[in-house]
Image: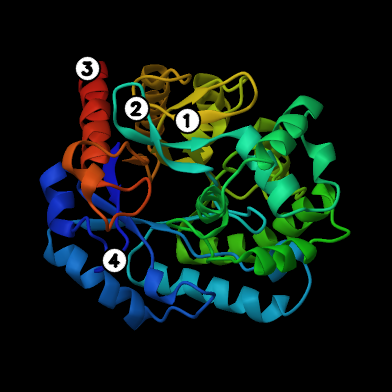
């Protein structure tokens, strides 16, 4: 597999020199300085590519071109949005980027309730706590109908906790959930979040899925023409949030997406952490069924809890059999080589990582994207790959 590392541009506190020292050869990045549905010219992409090449690295994967709300809802200036999005495919392809990762999550990208949760070994992990999510949704955001989306016991506990919560705790929870995380569309306030949720009024899962398929039927032919691979990232977590449907949460969703748009250019990301939140996740079965569609892997682990909460564990611990997942991906690469496929290697990156050692005290850091935690994860994954090889 191609060992890659996510990089947020020249303002990223983890530099390209750090990436090189970690031993990665590929960079996963995007034009984060032009991230709000702007056109990316070939010159823009080449300018972003230049320091990567100068560092002796390669830009393997663009993660990602944000998909605007109008395309998810099917309402508004969809023609212009599609023109911008497909134009950006062409610009990336012209500069040599071969894989483009995107997601179709309504309003919020990946979501956590705690960005500095103390893990068993003492490092600080990302956590999604369902009772805290219910507290925010029911008692702070006061979304109509939110009570019905959580078990009664969790709602009752949330209302009880809200009676004694401090304003500082409210602010911290709200910041963690809605203020924007690396790779997300943007930052929200409580009011702008309500407005974004309202944009989906009247839409159910079938509607959002139809909008995704309509988007793919325009974007995938452009990817085919340009010789690039589109890969969709799963919902994170794979469950509805704020009453909004999420339609890339498991194998059944993938089957519908690939049946509707069967082109080989319509691919997927195997995110072992996102899918791993599901108790029924089987990484080997997923690779065996969808292997030819997998061109990018986020390798991280989660520890599931009985109530639907989870935290990000060490890469080789947690609820996902990471060794089995890596073995299956290596087997898929071997199958491609035997078949004489043009694209055989799967780009991977160690996704997220605990805050460890002196990274804990740093004030300027992207949640989930510290240096030492990902370095540890990459080293562990590299060891697994070497042992299996």
Decide: is 61 above or below 35.
above
Q: Are marks 1 and 3 in contact (CB under 8 Å)?
A: no
Query: CA separation, marks 1 and 3?
Result: 27 Å
* Secondary structure of the residue carrying numbered label 3: helix
Neighbour class for label 4 at 10 Å: few (<14), some, many (≥20)?
A: some
Give the residue pinned by disc 2: 315
Of 373 and 136, which appears nearest the observer?
Answer: 136
Decide: is 222 above or below 129.
below
Q: Which mark is residue 9?
A: 4
Q: Can residue 301 be seen in this snapshot?
A: yes
Give the residue pinned by disc 1: 311
* Secondary structure of the residue carrying numbered label 2: loop
Query: CA separation, marks 3 and 2?
Result: 16 Å
Say which residue appears at 71% left-offset and 43% top-offset. Answer: 240
Which quadrant, please, contains the N terminus? top left
Query: CA separation, marks 1 and 4?
Result: 27 Å
Q: Nearer the viewer, mark 3 or mark 4?
A: 4
Of 188 and 85, which appears nearest the observer?
Answer: 188
Which quadrant, please, contains the C terminus? top left
Query: CA separation, marks 4 and 2?
Result: 25 Å
Q: Earlier in the sequence, mark 3 or mark 4?
A: 4
Q: Earlier in the sequence, mark 4 or mark 2?
A: 4
Q: Nearer the viewer, mark 1 or mark 4?
A: 1
Total marks placed: 4
Say which residue appears at 56% left-offset and 67% top-offset. Answer: 222
Neighbour class for label 1 at 10 Å: few (<14), some, many (≥20)?
A: many
Query: CA separation, marks 2 and 1?
Result: 12 Å
Say which residue appears at 61% left-offset and 50% top-offset. Answer: 263
Residue 308 at x, y = what percent? 63, 27
**Residue 314 located left or right of residue 277:** left
Q: Are marks 4 and 2 in contact (CB under 8 Å)?
A: no
Give the residue pinned by disc 3: 387
């Amino acid at each position: 597999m191609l060992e890659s590392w996510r990089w947020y541009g020249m303002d990223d506190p983890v530099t390209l020199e750090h990436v090189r020292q970690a031993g990665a050869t590929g960079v996963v990045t995007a034009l984060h300085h032009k991230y709000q549905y702007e056109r990316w010219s070939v010159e823009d992409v080449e300018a972003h590519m230049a320091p990567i090449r100068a560092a002796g690295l390669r830009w393997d994967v663009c993660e990602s071109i944000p998909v605007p709300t109008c395309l998810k809802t099917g309402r508004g200036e969809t023609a212009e949005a599609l023109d911008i999005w497909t134009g950006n495919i062409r610009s990336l392809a012209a500069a040599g980027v071969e894989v483009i990762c995107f997601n179709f999550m309504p309003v919020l990208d990946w979501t956590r309730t705690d960005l500095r949760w103390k893990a068993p070994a003492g490092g600080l992990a990302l956590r999604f706590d369902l009772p805290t999510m219910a507290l925010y949704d029911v008692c702070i955001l006061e979304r109509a109908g939110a009570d019905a989306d959580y078990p009664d016991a969790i709602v009752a506990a949330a209302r009880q906790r809200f009676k004694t919560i401090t304003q500082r705790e409210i602010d911290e929870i709200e910041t963690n959930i809605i203020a924007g995380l690396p790779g997300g569309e943007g930052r929200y306030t409580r009011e702008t979040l309500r407005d974004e949720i309202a944009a989906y009024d009247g839409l159910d899962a079938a509607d959002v899925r139809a909008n995704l398929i309509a988007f793919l039927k325009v974007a995938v032919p452009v990817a085919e023409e340009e010789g690039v691979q589109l890969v969709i990232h799963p919902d994170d977590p794979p469950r509805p949030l704020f009453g909004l449907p999420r339609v890339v949460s498991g194998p059944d969703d993938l089957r519908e997406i690939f049946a509707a748009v069967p082109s080989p250019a319509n691919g997927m990301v195997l995110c072992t952490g996102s899918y791993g939140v599901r108790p029924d996740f089987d990484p080997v079965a997923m690779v065996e069924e969808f292997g030819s569609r997998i061109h990018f892997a986020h390798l991280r682990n989660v520890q599931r809890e009985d109530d639907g909460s989870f935290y990000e564990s060490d890469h080789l611990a947690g609820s996902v059999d990471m060794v089995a997942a890596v073995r299956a991906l290596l087997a898929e690469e071997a199958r491609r080589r035997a078949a004489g496929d043009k694209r055989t290697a799967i780009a991977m990156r160690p996704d997220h990582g605990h805050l460890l050692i002196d990274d804990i005290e740093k004030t300027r850091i992207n949640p989930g994207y510290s240096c030492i935690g990902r370095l540890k994860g990459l080293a562990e994954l590299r060891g697994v790959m070497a042992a299996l090889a």
